[in-house]
Amino acid sequence: MAVQLQRSYAAVACLLLYYLSSGLSIPDPRQREALIQLELSMQTGGQMVLNDAEKQLDAHLFKMKQEEIMRADFPPAMHFFKARHLIRTSPIFSLLQKMPKGGALHIHDFAMIDVEWLVKNVTYRPHCYICFTDNQSIRFIFSSRSPKPIPHCSAWTLLENLRAKTVNTTDLDHSIMGNLTLFTDKDPETVYPSQDVVWSRFEQAFYALWGLVTYAPVFRDYYYQGLTEFYRDNIMYLELRALLPEIYELDGSTHNKAWALKTYQEITRQFTADHPDFFGARIIFTVHRGVNATVMTGVVEEAMTLQRDFPDIMAGFDLVGREDSGRPLWYFRDALSLPVERGVTLPFFFHAGETDLEGTEVDQNLLDALLLNTSRIGHGFALLRHPVARDLSRKRGVAVEVCPISNQVLKLVNDMRNHPAAALMSENHPVVISSDDPAMFGASGLSYDFYEAFVGFGGIRSNIGSLKELAMNSIRYSSLNPKQQEKALALWQRRWDKFVSENAF
Protein backbone atom coordinates (compact mmCIF):
# COMPACT_ATOMS: atom_id res chain seq x y z
CA MET A 1 0.00 0.00 0.00
CA ALA A 2 2.75 2.47 0.97
CA VAL A 3 4.64 1.76 -2.29
CA GLN A 4 1.46 2.28 -4.34
CA LEU A 5 0.77 5.56 -2.57
CA GLN A 6 4.33 6.69 -3.14
CA ARG A 7 4.06 5.95 -6.87
CA SER A 8 0.70 7.71 -7.04
CA TYR A 9 2.06 10.81 -5.31
CA ALA A 10 5.12 10.76 -7.55
CA ALA A 11 2.90 10.68 -10.64
CA VAL A 12 0.80 13.57 -9.34
CA ALA A 13 3.96 15.49 -8.52
CA CYS A 14 5.35 15.05 -12.03
CA LEU A 15 2.08 16.20 -13.58
CA LEU A 16 1.81 19.23 -11.32
CA LEU A 17 5.39 20.23 -11.87
CA TYR A 18 4.88 19.95 -15.61
CA TYR A 19 1.91 22.29 -15.53
CA LEU A 20 3.58 24.72 -13.15
CA SER A 21 6.84 24.89 -15.13
CA SER A 22 5.20 25.10 -18.54
CA GLY A 23 2.82 27.88 -17.56
CA LEU A 24 -0.02 25.99 -19.22
CA SER A 25 -2.35 26.18 -16.22
CA ILE A 26 -4.15 28.99 -14.42
CA PRO A 27 -3.93 28.41 -10.62
CA ASP A 28 -6.65 25.93 -9.73
CA PRO A 29 -7.97 25.06 -6.24
CA ARG A 30 -7.67 21.36 -7.05
CA GLN A 31 -4.03 21.77 -8.06
CA ARG A 32 -3.39 23.76 -4.90
CA GLU A 33 -4.95 21.07 -2.73
CA ALA A 34 -2.98 18.40 -4.57
CA LEU A 35 0.26 20.27 -3.86
CA ILE A 36 -0.63 20.61 -0.19
CA GLN A 37 -1.44 16.91 0.06
CA LEU A 38 1.76 16.04 -1.80
CA GLU A 39 3.85 17.95 0.74
CA LEU A 40 2.00 16.35 3.62
CA SER A 41 2.65 12.92 2.15
CA MET A 42 6.39 13.61 2.11
CA GLN A 43 6.75 14.35 5.83
CA THR A 44 7.63 11.85 8.54
CA GLY A 45 4.58 9.61 8.85
CA GLY A 46 2.93 11.22 5.81
CA GLN A 47 2.28 7.89 4.10
CA MET A 48 1.24 6.07 7.24
CA VAL A 49 -2.15 4.41 6.72
CA LEU A 50 -4.24 5.00 9.86
CA ASN A 51 -7.09 2.87 11.14
CA ASP A 52 -10.34 4.38 12.45
CA ALA A 53 -9.17 4.55 16.06
CA GLU A 54 -5.93 6.25 15.03
CA LYS A 55 -7.90 8.77 12.96
CA GLN A 56 -10.06 9.57 15.98
CA LEU A 57 -6.99 10.09 18.16
CA ASP A 58 -5.42 12.19 15.41
CA ALA A 59 -8.47 14.48 15.30
CA HIS A 60 -8.26 14.89 19.07
CA LEU A 61 -4.53 15.65 18.86
CA PHE A 62 -5.12 18.20 16.11
CA LYS A 63 -7.55 20.17 18.29
CA MET A 64 -5.13 20.08 21.22
CA LYS A 65 -2.28 21.27 19.01
CA GLN A 66 -4.35 24.12 17.59
CA GLU A 67 -4.95 25.36 21.12
CA GLU A 68 -1.29 24.89 22.05
CA ILE A 69 0.03 26.87 19.09
CA MET A 70 -2.28 29.79 19.87
CA ARG A 71 -0.80 30.20 23.37
CA ALA A 72 1.03 33.46 24.02
CA ASP A 73 3.63 31.50 25.99
CA PHE A 74 4.28 28.85 23.33
CA PRO A 75 6.73 26.38 24.95
CA PRO A 76 8.84 25.40 21.88
CA ALA A 77 9.62 29.10 21.33
CA MET A 78 11.03 29.36 24.86
CA HIS A 79 14.15 28.02 26.56
CA PHE A 80 13.30 24.62 28.02
CA PHE A 81 14.19 25.73 31.55
CA LYS A 82 11.46 28.39 31.29
CA ALA A 83 9.03 26.16 29.40
CA ARG A 84 9.26 22.99 31.49
CA HIS A 85 6.43 23.85 33.88
CA LEU A 86 4.23 24.84 30.93
CA ILE A 87 4.96 21.59 29.11
CA ARG A 88 4.07 19.61 32.22
CA THR A 89 0.55 21.10 32.19
CA SER A 90 0.03 20.46 28.47
CA PRO A 91 -2.55 17.78 27.57
CA ILE A 92 -0.36 16.87 24.60
CA PHE A 93 2.54 16.15 26.94
CA SER A 94 0.28 14.06 29.14
CA LEU A 95 -0.70 12.00 26.11
CA LEU A 96 2.91 11.64 24.98
CA GLN A 97 3.88 10.30 28.40
CA LYS A 98 1.38 7.47 27.90
CA MET A 99 2.48 6.81 24.33
CA PRO A 100 4.79 3.81 23.70
CA LYS A 101 7.79 5.59 22.20
CA GLY A 102 9.87 2.55 21.26
CA GLY A 103 13.58 2.96 21.98
CA ALA A 104 15.90 5.67 23.26
CA LEU A 105 18.98 5.42 21.05
CA HIS A 106 21.09 8.39 22.20
CA ILE A 107 21.48 8.41 25.99
CA HIS A 108 24.67 8.95 28.01
CA ASP A 109 25.51 6.72 30.93
CA PHE A 110 25.82 9.21 33.81
CA ALA A 111 23.01 11.61 32.91
CA MET A 112 20.09 9.17 32.84
CA ILE A 113 18.21 9.80 36.07
CA ASP A 114 16.80 12.53 38.25
CA VAL A 115 19.60 14.04 40.36
CA GLU A 116 17.25 14.12 43.36
CA TRP A 117 17.46 10.31 43.41
CA LEU A 118 21.25 10.55 43.54
CA VAL A 119 21.20 13.00 46.44
CA LYS A 120 18.53 11.20 48.47
CA ASN A 121 19.58 7.62 47.70
CA VAL A 122 23.35 7.86 47.23
CA THR A 123 24.87 10.76 49.16
CA TYR A 124 23.22 9.55 52.38
CA ARG A 125 25.04 6.22 52.19
CA PRO A 126 27.86 5.55 54.68
CA HIS A 127 31.47 6.43 53.83
CA CYS A 128 30.54 9.20 51.36
CA TYR A 129 33.09 12.03 51.32
CA ILE A 130 32.80 15.44 49.65
CA CYS A 131 35.29 18.16 48.77
CA PHE A 132 34.85 21.62 47.25
CA THR A 133 36.89 22.68 44.21
CA ASP A 134 38.58 25.99 43.44
CA ASN A 135 36.07 26.65 40.65
CA GLN A 136 33.03 26.27 42.94
CA SER A 137 32.17 22.70 42.02
CA ILE A 138 32.22 19.53 44.17
CA ARG A 139 33.70 16.05 44.08
CA PHE A 140 32.70 12.81 45.83
CA ILE A 141 34.35 9.57 46.83
CA PHE A 142 33.33 6.56 48.90
CA SER A 143 36.11 5.24 51.08
CA SER A 144 36.56 3.06 54.15
CA ARG A 145 39.31 5.42 55.34
CA SER A 146 40.16 9.10 54.96
CA PRO A 147 40.82 9.64 51.22
CA LYS A 148 44.01 11.15 49.87
CA PRO A 149 43.69 14.84 48.95
CA ILE A 150 43.27 15.78 45.30
CA PRO A 151 44.54 18.92 43.54
CA HIS A 152 42.44 22.08 43.53
CA CYS A 153 39.98 20.71 46.09
CA SER A 154 39.44 21.28 49.80
CA ALA A 155 40.11 18.59 52.38
CA TRP A 156 37.72 15.65 52.13
CA THR A 157 34.81 15.83 54.59
CA LEU A 158 32.58 12.93 55.55
CA LEU A 159 29.19 14.02 54.27
CA GLU A 160 27.26 12.66 57.24
CA ASN A 161 29.45 14.78 59.56
CA LEU A 162 28.89 17.86 57.40
CA ARG A 163 25.14 17.32 57.51
CA ALA A 164 25.29 16.89 61.29
CA LYS A 165 26.88 20.34 61.57
CA THR A 166 24.54 21.97 59.05
CA VAL A 167 21.48 23.82 60.33
CA ASN A 168 19.46 23.37 57.13
CA THR A 169 20.30 20.09 55.39
CA THR A 170 17.61 20.77 52.78
CA ASP A 171 19.58 23.77 51.54
CA LEU A 172 22.73 21.65 51.45
CA ASP A 173 20.97 18.96 49.43
CA HIS A 174 19.62 21.55 46.99
CA SER A 175 23.11 22.98 46.63
CA ILE A 176 24.47 19.52 45.81
CA MET A 177 21.70 18.97 43.26
CA GLY A 178 22.56 22.28 41.65
CA ASN A 179 26.09 21.00 41.03
CA LEU A 180 24.81 17.84 39.32
CA THR A 181 22.59 19.48 36.71
CA LEU A 182 22.48 22.47 34.36
CA PHE A 183 18.87 23.22 35.22
CA THR A 184 18.31 26.57 36.90
CA ASP A 185 15.30 28.59 38.08
CA LYS A 186 17.16 31.77 37.15
CA ASP A 187 17.24 33.26 33.67
CA PRO A 188 19.19 30.63 31.67
CA GLU A 189 20.36 33.20 29.13
CA THR A 190 22.02 35.17 31.92
CA VAL A 191 23.44 32.13 33.71
CA TYR A 192 24.75 30.63 30.44
CA PRO A 193 25.55 33.55 28.12
CA SER A 194 27.68 31.53 25.67
CA GLN A 195 28.42 28.01 24.47
CA ASP A 196 31.78 28.10 26.25
CA VAL A 197 30.13 28.90 29.58
CA VAL A 198 27.39 26.27 29.32
CA TRP A 199 29.79 23.56 28.12
CA SER A 200 32.21 24.32 30.95
CA ARG A 201 29.39 24.00 33.46
CA PHE A 202 28.18 20.84 31.69
CA GLU A 203 31.57 19.17 32.01
CA GLN A 204 31.93 20.22 35.67
CA ALA A 205 28.60 18.56 36.45
CA PHE A 206 29.90 15.28 35.02
CA TYR A 207 33.07 15.55 37.10
CA ALA A 208 30.92 16.12 40.19
CA LEU A 209 28.87 13.00 39.40
CA TRP A 210 31.86 10.81 38.70
CA GLY A 211 32.85 9.71 42.19
CA LEU A 212 29.23 8.88 43.04
CA VAL A 213 28.30 6.74 40.06
CA THR A 214 31.62 4.91 39.63
CA TYR A 215 31.34 3.40 43.13
CA ALA A 216 30.45 -0.25 42.45
CA PRO A 217 27.27 -0.57 44.58
CA VAL A 218 25.96 2.75 43.23
CA PHE A 219 26.93 1.85 39.65
CA ARG A 220 24.60 -1.15 39.80
CA ASP A 221 21.74 0.69 41.49
CA TYR A 222 22.12 3.73 39.24
CA TYR A 223 21.77 1.72 36.04
CA TYR A 224 18.74 -0.19 37.33
CA GLN A 225 17.13 3.10 38.37
CA GLY A 226 17.92 4.56 34.95
CA LEU A 227 16.16 1.69 33.21
CA THR A 228 13.25 2.16 35.61
CA GLU A 229 12.83 5.84 34.79
CA PHE A 230 12.86 5.22 31.04
CA TYR A 231 10.51 2.27 31.42
CA ARG A 232 8.05 4.47 33.36
CA ASP A 233 8.10 6.87 30.42
CA ASN A 234 6.99 4.01 28.16
CA ILE A 235 10.39 3.26 26.62
CA MET A 236 10.86 -0.41 25.82
CA TYR A 237 14.47 -0.43 24.62
CA LEU A 238 17.65 1.54 25.29
CA GLU A 239 21.02 2.06 23.64
CA LEU A 240 23.36 3.63 26.16
CA ARG A 241 26.59 5.42 25.33
CA ALA A 242 28.93 4.40 28.12
CA LEU A 243 32.55 5.24 28.92
CA LEU A 244 32.97 1.91 30.74
CA PRO A 245 35.06 3.63 33.41
CA GLU A 246 37.17 2.06 36.10
CA ILE A 247 34.66 1.12 38.82
CA TYR A 248 35.94 1.19 42.40
CA GLU A 249 35.10 -0.55 45.67
CA LEU A 250 35.10 0.85 49.20
CA ASP A 251 38.63 -0.41 49.83
CA GLY A 252 39.95 1.36 46.73
CA SER A 253 40.27 -1.74 44.52
CA THR A 254 39.03 -1.30 40.96
CA HIS A 255 37.34 -3.18 38.12
CA ASN A 256 38.11 -2.96 34.40
CA LYS A 257 35.96 -2.24 31.33
CA ALA A 258 35.00 -5.90 30.85
CA TRP A 259 33.64 -5.96 34.42
CA ALA A 260 31.60 -2.82 33.77
CA LEU A 261 30.18 -4.23 30.53
CA LYS A 262 29.38 -7.55 32.20
CA THR A 263 27.60 -5.65 34.98
CA TYR A 264 25.51 -3.76 32.43
CA GLN A 265 24.62 -7.12 30.90
CA GLU A 266 23.63 -8.66 34.25
CA ILE A 267 21.51 -5.68 35.34
CA THR A 268 19.80 -5.55 31.93
CA ARG A 269 18.86 -9.22 32.22
CA GLN A 270 17.62 -8.69 35.75
CA PHE A 271 15.50 -5.69 34.73
CA THR A 272 14.06 -7.51 31.72
CA ALA A 273 13.15 -10.48 33.94
CA ASP A 274 11.42 -8.08 36.34
CA HIS A 275 9.66 -6.27 33.47
CA PRO A 276 8.81 -8.78 30.71
CA ASP A 277 7.45 -6.07 28.37
CA PHE A 278 10.84 -4.30 28.39
CA PHE A 279 12.80 -5.48 25.36
CA GLY A 280 16.33 -4.83 26.60
CA ALA A 281 19.34 -2.55 26.30
CA ARG A 282 22.69 -2.44 24.53
CA ILE A 283 25.87 -0.47 25.16
CA ILE A 284 27.77 1.80 22.77
CA PHE A 285 31.30 1.97 24.19
CA THR A 286 32.66 5.53 24.10
CA VAL A 287 35.90 7.44 24.58
CA HIS A 288 36.48 11.18 24.95
CA ARG A 289 37.50 12.82 21.69
CA GLY A 290 40.23 14.75 23.50
CA VAL A 291 42.59 11.74 23.58
CA ASN A 292 45.54 11.48 21.18
CA ALA A 293 45.92 9.08 18.25
CA THR A 294 48.01 6.57 20.20
CA VAL A 295 45.44 6.32 22.98
CA MET A 296 42.64 6.00 20.42
CA THR A 297 44.41 3.08 18.76
CA GLY A 298 44.53 1.25 22.07
CA VAL A 299 40.89 2.02 22.81
CA VAL A 300 39.74 0.77 19.39
CA GLU A 301 41.73 -2.42 19.98
CA GLU A 302 39.94 -2.83 23.30
CA ALA A 303 36.58 -2.10 21.67
CA MET A 304 37.11 -4.88 19.13
CA THR A 305 37.90 -7.31 21.94
CA LEU A 306 34.81 -6.29 23.91
CA GLN A 307 32.67 -6.58 20.77
CA ARG A 308 33.95 -10.13 20.28
CA ASP A 309 33.48 -11.14 23.93
CA PHE A 310 30.12 -9.43 24.55
CA PRO A 311 28.24 -9.45 21.21
CA ASP A 312 24.80 -9.48 22.83
CA ILE A 313 25.21 -6.40 25.00
CA MET A 314 27.75 -4.35 23.03
CA ALA A 315 26.33 -2.43 20.09
CA GLY A 316 29.42 -0.57 18.89
CA PHE A 317 31.69 2.43 19.40
CA ASP A 318 31.58 6.25 19.49
CA LEU A 319 33.51 9.37 20.51
CA VAL A 320 32.05 11.79 23.06
CA GLY A 321 32.80 15.26 24.38
CA ARG A 322 32.35 18.73 22.91
CA GLU A 323 32.86 18.49 19.17
CA ASP A 324 34.00 22.11 18.78
CA SER A 325 36.98 21.71 21.13
CA GLY A 326 37.73 18.01 20.59
CA ARG A 327 39.74 16.38 17.86
CA PRO A 328 37.85 15.71 14.58
CA LEU A 329 37.15 12.22 13.31
CA TRP A 330 39.68 12.61 10.49
CA TYR A 331 42.47 12.96 13.05
CA PHE A 332 41.65 9.43 14.24
CA ARG A 333 41.15 7.90 10.80
CA ASP A 334 43.99 5.36 11.14
CA ALA A 335 42.74 4.03 14.46
CA LEU A 336 39.12 4.01 13.29
CA SER A 337 40.11 2.08 10.14
CA LEU A 338 41.58 -0.81 12.14
CA PRO A 339 38.38 -2.90 12.31
CA VAL A 340 37.95 -2.87 8.51
CA GLU A 341 41.63 -3.59 7.95
CA ARG A 342 41.40 -6.63 10.22
CA GLY A 343 38.04 -7.83 8.97
CA VAL A 344 36.45 -7.23 12.37
CA THR A 345 32.89 -5.98 12.81
CA LEU A 346 32.76 -2.94 15.06
CA PRO A 347 29.72 -0.74 14.28
CA PHE A 348 30.21 3.01 14.68
CA PHE A 349 27.61 5.45 16.01
CA PHE A 350 29.45 8.73 15.67
CA HIS A 351 28.53 12.06 17.19
CA ALA A 352 28.83 14.41 14.21
CA GLY A 353 27.51 17.83 13.27
CA GLU A 354 26.76 18.94 16.85
CA THR A 355 28.18 22.33 15.90
CA ASP A 356 27.49 25.66 14.27
CA LEU A 357 31.13 26.21 13.21
CA GLU A 358 30.33 26.14 9.51
CA GLY A 359 33.22 25.37 7.18
CA THR A 360 35.69 24.33 9.87
CA GLU A 361 37.50 21.02 10.31
CA VAL A 362 34.94 20.18 13.00
CA ASP A 363 32.13 20.83 10.52
CA GLN A 364 33.55 18.08 8.27
CA ASN A 365 32.82 15.41 10.88
CA LEU A 366 29.52 14.62 9.15
CA LEU A 367 31.20 13.66 5.88
CA ASP A 368 33.95 11.79 7.72
CA ALA A 369 31.42 9.88 9.82
CA LEU A 370 29.80 8.63 6.61
CA LEU A 371 33.20 7.84 5.07
CA LEU A 372 33.90 5.71 8.14
CA ASN A 373 30.54 3.96 7.62
CA THR A 374 28.73 5.17 10.73
CA SER A 375 25.47 3.32 11.47
CA ARG A 376 23.76 6.46 12.81
CA ILE A 377 24.64 10.14 13.22
CA GLY A 378 24.55 11.59 16.72
CA HIS A 379 22.82 15.02 16.63
CA GLY A 380 23.58 15.93 13.00
CA PHE A 381 22.59 19.53 13.72
CA ALA A 382 24.74 20.77 10.82
CA LEU A 383 23.34 18.30 8.28
CA LEU A 384 21.35 20.89 6.31
CA ARG A 385 24.63 22.63 5.44
CA HIS A 386 25.97 19.41 3.89
CA PRO A 387 23.80 18.35 0.93
CA VAL A 388 26.15 15.49 0.04
CA ALA A 389 26.08 14.09 3.58
CA ARG A 390 22.32 14.62 3.71
CA ASP A 391 21.83 12.70 0.48
CA LEU A 392 24.21 9.90 1.49
CA SER A 393 22.61 9.43 4.89
CA ARG A 394 19.17 9.19 3.28
CA LYS A 395 20.27 6.69 0.62
CA ARG A 396 22.17 4.54 3.12
CA GLY A 397 19.42 4.69 5.75
CA VAL A 398 21.73 6.32 8.29
CA ALA A 399 19.35 7.87 10.80
CA VAL A 400 20.02 11.15 12.59
CA GLU A 401 19.66 10.94 16.39
CA VAL A 402 17.95 14.27 17.12
CA CYS A 403 18.09 15.52 20.73
CA PRO A 404 15.99 18.73 20.73
CA ILE A 405 16.38 19.90 24.33
CA SER A 406 20.11 19.18 24.40
CA ASN A 407 20.63 21.26 21.25
CA GLN A 408 18.72 24.16 22.75
CA VAL A 409 20.30 24.09 26.22
CA LEU A 410 23.78 23.84 24.69
CA LYS A 411 22.94 26.93 22.63
CA LEU A 412 22.74 25.64 19.07
CA VAL A 413 19.14 26.82 18.59
CA ASN A 414 16.78 29.13 20.48
CA ASP A 415 13.35 28.47 18.98
CA MET A 416 12.53 24.80 18.32
CA ARG A 417 10.56 25.80 15.24
CA ASN A 418 13.90 26.76 13.67
CA HIS A 419 15.66 23.49 14.47
CA PRO A 420 17.16 21.84 11.34
CA ALA A 421 15.30 18.63 12.16
CA ALA A 422 12.06 20.42 11.22
CA ALA A 423 13.29 20.43 7.61
CA LEU A 424 14.51 16.85 7.87
CA MET A 425 11.12 15.69 9.13
CA SER A 426 9.32 17.61 6.40
CA GLU A 427 10.98 15.32 3.85
CA ASN A 428 10.90 12.11 5.95
CA HIS A 429 14.66 11.95 6.35
CA PRO A 430 15.62 9.02 8.62
CA VAL A 431 15.28 10.52 12.10
CA VAL A 432 14.96 9.22 15.66
CA ILE A 433 14.17 11.37 18.69
CA SER A 434 16.24 11.01 21.84
CA SER A 435 17.12 12.96 24.99
CA ASP A 436 20.94 12.78 25.25
CA ASP A 437 21.48 13.78 28.93
CA PRO A 438 17.98 14.28 30.36
CA ALA A 439 19.05 14.55 34.01
CA MET A 440 21.40 17.43 33.13
CA PHE A 441 18.52 19.37 31.60
CA GLY A 442 15.87 18.77 34.25
CA ALA A 443 14.03 16.38 31.94
CA SER A 444 13.41 12.63 32.08
CA GLY A 445 12.84 9.79 29.64
CA LEU A 446 11.81 10.89 26.13
CA SER A 447 8.45 12.62 26.53
CA TYR A 448 9.81 16.16 26.82
CA ASP A 449 11.88 15.75 23.66
CA PHE A 450 8.98 14.14 21.83
CA TYR A 451 6.85 17.14 22.80
CA GLU A 452 9.43 19.57 21.38
CA ALA A 453 9.68 17.54 18.18
CA PHE A 454 5.95 17.03 17.72
CA VAL A 455 4.77 20.53 18.61
CA GLY A 456 7.89 22.53 17.75
CA PHE A 457 9.42 20.82 14.70
CA GLY A 458 6.18 19.52 13.26
CA GLY A 459 3.96 22.53 13.84
CA ILE A 460 0.32 22.02 13.00
CA ARG A 461 1.12 19.59 10.18
CA SER A 462 2.67 16.71 12.10
CA ASN A 463 0.12 14.16 13.25
CA ILE A 464 -0.37 10.78 14.86
CA GLY A 465 1.30 9.22 11.82
CA SER A 466 4.42 11.29 12.54
CA LEU A 467 4.52 10.07 16.13
CA LYS A 468 3.94 6.49 15.04
CA GLU A 469 6.75 6.56 12.47
CA LEU A 470 9.19 8.20 14.90
CA ALA A 471 8.52 5.48 17.44
CA MET A 472 8.91 2.75 14.81
CA ASN A 473 12.11 4.40 13.53
CA SER A 474 13.66 3.94 16.96
CA ILE A 475 13.42 0.19 16.46
CA ARG A 476 14.13 0.07 12.71
CA TYR A 477 17.34 2.08 13.10
CA SER A 478 18.49 0.39 16.30
CA SER A 479 21.47 -1.96 16.49
CA LEU A 480 19.13 -4.95 16.94
CA ASN A 481 19.39 -7.60 14.25
CA PRO A 482 16.45 -8.03 11.81
CA LYS A 483 14.80 -10.85 13.80
CA GLN A 484 15.08 -8.89 17.04
CA GLN A 485 13.67 -5.79 15.33
CA GLU A 486 10.72 -7.79 14.05
CA LYS A 487 10.04 -9.13 17.53
CA ALA A 488 10.44 -5.69 19.12
CA LEU A 489 8.12 -4.08 16.56
CA ALA A 490 5.46 -6.71 17.27
CA LEU A 491 5.72 -6.02 21.00
CA TRP A 492 5.60 -2.27 20.37
CA GLN A 493 2.57 -2.64 18.04
CA ARG A 494 0.56 -4.38 20.77
CA ARG A 495 1.34 -1.57 23.19
CA TRP A 496 0.55 1.04 20.52
CA ASP A 497 -2.85 -0.50 19.72
CA LYS A 498 -3.70 -0.52 23.42
CA PHE A 499 -2.61 3.12 23.78
CA VAL A 500 -4.73 4.19 20.78
CA SER A 501 -7.83 2.28 21.94
CA GLU A 502 -7.61 3.81 25.41
CA ASN A 503 -7.17 7.40 24.17
CA ALA A 504 -9.25 7.60 20.98
CA PHE A 505 -12.53 9.41 21.58
Image (cartoon, helix red, strand yellow):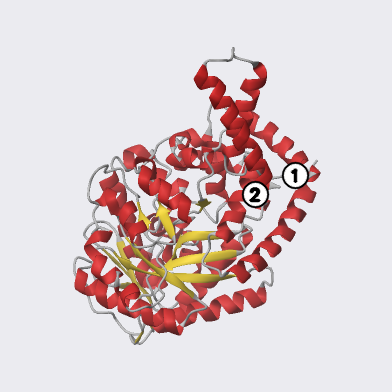
Q: Which residue is drawn at 61% across and 58% down?
A: 102
Answer left or right for 44 relative to 188. right
Q: Nearer the viewer, residue 297 or 151?
A: 297
Q: Residue at x 54, y 25 (%)?
A: 18
How far apart, in angstroms, are the residues tagged by discs 1 and 2? 10 Å
Q: Residue at x 31, y 63 (%)?
A: 138
Q: Indicate whether 232 appears above or below 121.
A: above
Indicate the position of residue 362 as horizontal and vertical percent values: 26, 51
Indicate the position of residue 116 as horizontal and vertical percent values: 49, 60
- Mark 2 residue type: Lys
Q: Nearer the viewer, residue 167 or 139?
A: 139
- Mark 1 residue type: Glu
SS at circle 2: helix
Query: Which residue matches tag 2?
Result: 468
Q: Label 2 near label 1: C-beta < 8 Å?
A: yes
Query: Which residue matches tag 1?
Result: 54
Crowding at mark 1 (Cα within 10 Å: few <14, some 14-19, many 20+)? many
Indicate the position of residue 430 as horizontal and vertical percent values: 51, 50
Is residue 132 visible in the rendered structure shown here? Answer: yes
Is residue 168 visible in the rendered structure shown here? Answer: no
